[in-house]
Image (tube, helix red, strand yellow):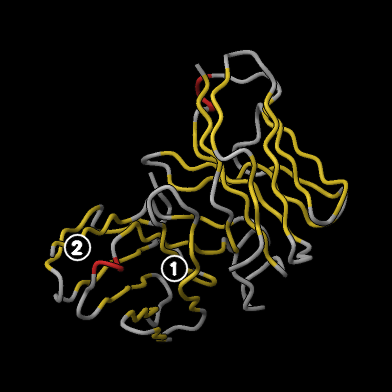
Amino acid sequence: DAGITQSPRHKVTETGTPVTLRCHQTENHRYMYWYRQDPGHGLRLIHYSYGVKDTDKGEVSDGYSVSRSKTEDFLLTLESATSSQTSVYFCAISERPRTGYNSPLHFGNGTRLTVT
Amino acid sequence: SQELEQSPQSLIVQEGKNLTINCTSSKTLYGLYWYKQKYGEGLIFLMMLQKGGEEKSHEKITAKLDEKKQQSSLHITASQPSHAGIYLCGAHRMDSNYQLIWGAGTKLIIKP
């Protein structure tokens, strides 16, 4: 199994509070991703990183920010949590960005976030 | 609507029976991934298909990508309780190096 640790695994927070989720990898992979998973929507990309301090937005980035100061850590921050951000959040890593290089995503075990 | 349509949404199969899950797109797929997700856990990579007509197998699971690269099937032979979970397909978009599109998943239940 790829060495990916997400923390916390579960969190309950109140509307309007900031929340930070952490993803830590031990594989030294360059590419890291944050997804959210919701019933009926499948997985949706929030932000991704293609190197230290190099990040970009995914399809559902509003209300989220990320930071990557080290290869192994990728942080996702909900600036002011809303109930619509209640979801399961997955971190993923890959060696290379694109198919054709036989580089699948490897996922962490997820963080279940509830915003009340 | 999902850009990748998975069918069926859920499936209940008697242990020992065969089953097939489909993943369909209206556009050409550039790399097709199959993942399995156990309840409360992350996604486990099963297989990746790239070429039209390609077929791969791992233990009792076989995945195929059609010649047009618009449809993939995942076939499980002689299903076991360990096969239970949610199966997801994902594929690369032609216009993005980083973003995968995903199906909504197929929930598989194995009856003993």
Q: Name the kind of residue labelled 2 in the image.
A: Ile
Q: Provide residue A57's location: percent of width, then percent of height.
A: 71, 42
Residue B18, position as x, y percentages in the image: 18, 76
In the rendered image, residue B27, in percent from the top left (x then y), is placed at: 45, 63
Cα distance in 3D space between marks 1 and 2: 19 Å
In the image, residue B3 sits, relative to residue A114, either above or below, namely below
Residue B73 in which image quadrant? bottom left
Q: Look at 16% across and 59% down and name the residue there.
A: B12
Q: Amino acid at mark 1?
A: Trp
Residue B34, numbered label: 1
Q: Is residue A18 left or right of residue B51?
A: right
Comes first in the chain, label 1 or label 2: 1
Q: Quadrant of the N terminus of chain B?
A: top left
Name the one closer to the observer, A18 or A26. Answer: A26
Tag 2 subunit? B
Q: Residue tagged by mark 2?
A: B110
Residue A13 numbered mark, or none: none
Of tags 1 and 2, the one toward the viewer is 2
Q: Which residue is located at x 39 percent, y 56 percent?
A: B38
Is A58 displayed left or right of B45 in the figure?
right
Along the viewing direction, whichever of B93 and A72 lies nearer the viewer? A72
**CA neighbours of label 1 inside 10 A, class few (<14), some (14 to 19), many (20+):** many
In terms of image quadrants, where is residue A76?
top right
Where does the image place residue A111, in percent across and percent down from the top left? 55, 40
Name above or below for residue A83 compared with residue B35: above
Residues B5 and A23: in front is: A23
Q: Chain of mark 1?
A: B
Q: Is residue A49 above or below residue A27?
A: above
| Element carrying mark 1 | strand
At a point 54% along the width and 24% down the height, the residue shown is A12
